[in-house]
Structure formats: C-alpha cells, structure tokens
Image (cartoon, rainbow, N blue to C red):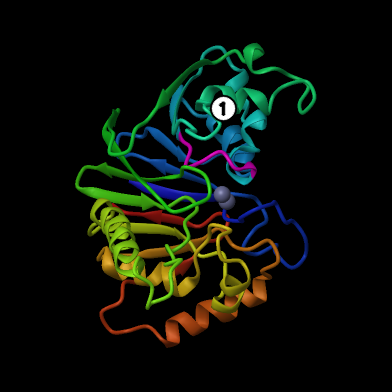
Amino acid sequence: MKVRFWGVRGSIASPGPSTVRYGGNTTCIELTTDAGHTIIFDAGTGIRPLGLKLLAAEQKKCAVCISHTHWDHIQGLPFFVPLFSADREVHFYGAFDPVYQKDLESILAQQMEYCYFPIRALELKAKLHYHTLHEGARIEFEDAVITNVMMNHPVLTYGYRVDCNGKSVFFSGDHEPPHNIYDSDDTFYGEYDQLIQDKVGRICEVANEVDLFIIDAQYTEPELLQKRGWGHGTFSSALAMARRAKAKKVVFTHHDPSRTDDQLDRIGAKLQAQRRSNDPPMLIAAEGLEIDLG
Ligand SMILES: [Zn+2]
Ligand SMILES: [Zn+2]
C-alpha cells in the first residue's frame, strides 16, 4: 500500500511564499492498494491535482472517504475531474449529519448549487454511489478493508482505517483531544472523565498497531488554549495518541493556515530532539510526501 499527500493544510487553502514547501492545499490523501486501487481520504483542494492524475490512469473506479463535510475537506470536490467523465465510478463514504438531518449526498450537492458553483451535482457524468456509514462499519473495497470510528470534532467526524495485505493506515480527519468540562472537584468530573477515556480508547483500538497514523496537529499548546472547542489537536496530543495506539509511524497534518514552512521545520526539529527511544518515526506532512508501506 502506498500513501501520497495532496493537501496537508487545515481550515483554508493558504498558498504563498511562506507555505510553498509544505504546501497550501487543504486535506486530501491518496492511498493506492497493492492491487492498484485508489482510496482517497477527504476532498479538500488537494483533490484537484489528484483528479488530473487519476483521469490519465487506467483505473476507472475509486473510493472517497469523507471524514466530515467542513469546507476544507470537501471544497475541492467540484474540481475533481473524474466526476465529469461517464466512464468513471466514484464511491463516497461518510456520516449522516444527525443535527441537520442531512446525508452526505445532499451536503455535497448543496455546494454545487448555482449560488456556489456553475455546474449542478445532477449534471455530473460519472457513476456516483453514496454510502452512509454508521460507526464501526466494515467496508470491503477491492483488495482493501475500510473501518471507521467517531472522532472528537464539532460535527460528526469519522477517522478511517484501511487494511490491505497485512498493512494498515489510520487517518484521523479533524480531532481535538476531549477535554473535561468539569472542575476536578465537581461531582460529574469522574463520570465525564470515564466518557473521555472510553472515547479515546475506542479510537486507539481501531488504530491499534497501525503501520501509518495520520493525525490532525493543527495547533501548538498555547494556540489550543485560545481555541479550545474548535476541534483540533496539537503536535503533543497527536503524539500521545499515536503512542497509545502503538502506531508504527506518525504523520502530523492539517497544518494551521498561518503556519509557515520555517515554523514547521522548527517544530519538526524539536519533535526529533525530544523523541523518546521507543517512539515511532515521525514526519510532518507535506504536499507530495509519499510513503510506501510495502
Ligand atoms: Zn479541517
Ligand atoms: Zn473540521
């Protein structure tokens, strides 16, 4: 299985001289299974160049696993050219939004209404299949198996694990380490803490001993204090989770739009310097980064 990063930015695309090395496109990750099939995690602006590559490829079918439908994870989709080609088949996987009572198909179609985009979803030529997932689903897609787990974000968000031929990848989507809303001397503190432990435990169980753990690390610790509840993790919370899941390699992604290349270099150097001897290898995601899991 091979993994390639096409978009590593969170929140909004951020092109410019200070992001040119790590890249400014929003979340999109391509997995190629051992048999050559394509599974995509999220459809941020990075999916546009990926679509151009796929259009030139022989493979006519792909899966797109949507972690959640915030803009930075779906905004590239109207520019994903395979959707416009009648000989293509695209399978979308994602959650039903229980708050707004909308499924993935209607949310994705909404961003292609005339007030937002000149071509409507019903004009797309490819064969499109929308699959609404409940938590803990098990999907067989060609030679891979996809499973999911609920993460901690303001909207229902799935993390996905893909297994193929004994190798595995976990992608968190957006995730904030759950925070106890009660003071430690409050009656409800212990009960709430148990809920948090259960939630994190479920995620780490799904991601257990994964070969590649790709996780949201948008903030630094001081930034998280200012942005608690916005739904993102830090480099250290991401690493703590990777350790708990016994991941074999970690990639930090969903970089803050304000994070410059030089800052990411410095964060990467600090992480390496503070690395414990039994920590997994760590990488900071960059557009074009490819990892071959063999
Ligand atoms: Zn995001
Ligand atoms: Zn989000």
Residue 175 placement (x, y as % from top left): 47, 56
The residue labelled by disc 1 is: 55
Using the image, determine if residue 77 lies above or below residue 224: above
- Residue 284 colored in magenta in the image: no
Indicate whether 292 appears above or below 192.
above
Identity of the residue drawn at 53% across and 23% down: 105
Q: Is residue 129 left or right of residue 46?
A: left
Q: Is mark 1 within 8 Å of ligand 1?
A: no
Residue most extreme to the bottom: 273
* Residue 242 visible in the shown view: yes
Residue 128 drawn at (x, y percent): 50, 17
Judging depth in this view, the residue of 160 and 186 nearest the camera is 186
**Does residue 59 appear in this view?**
no
In the displayed structure, 242 sits above or below 56; it is: below
Q: Position of residue 129 (x, y in %)?
A: 45, 18
Residue drawn at the location 56% of the way across and 31% of the way down: 100
Most foreground residue, 278 or 292: 278
Please state the extent of the stretch shown in magenta in the rendering: 65-71
Q: Among all residues in the image, which is located at the extreme front?
A: 187
Residue 219: quarter of image: bottom right
Q: Residue furthest left?
A: 166
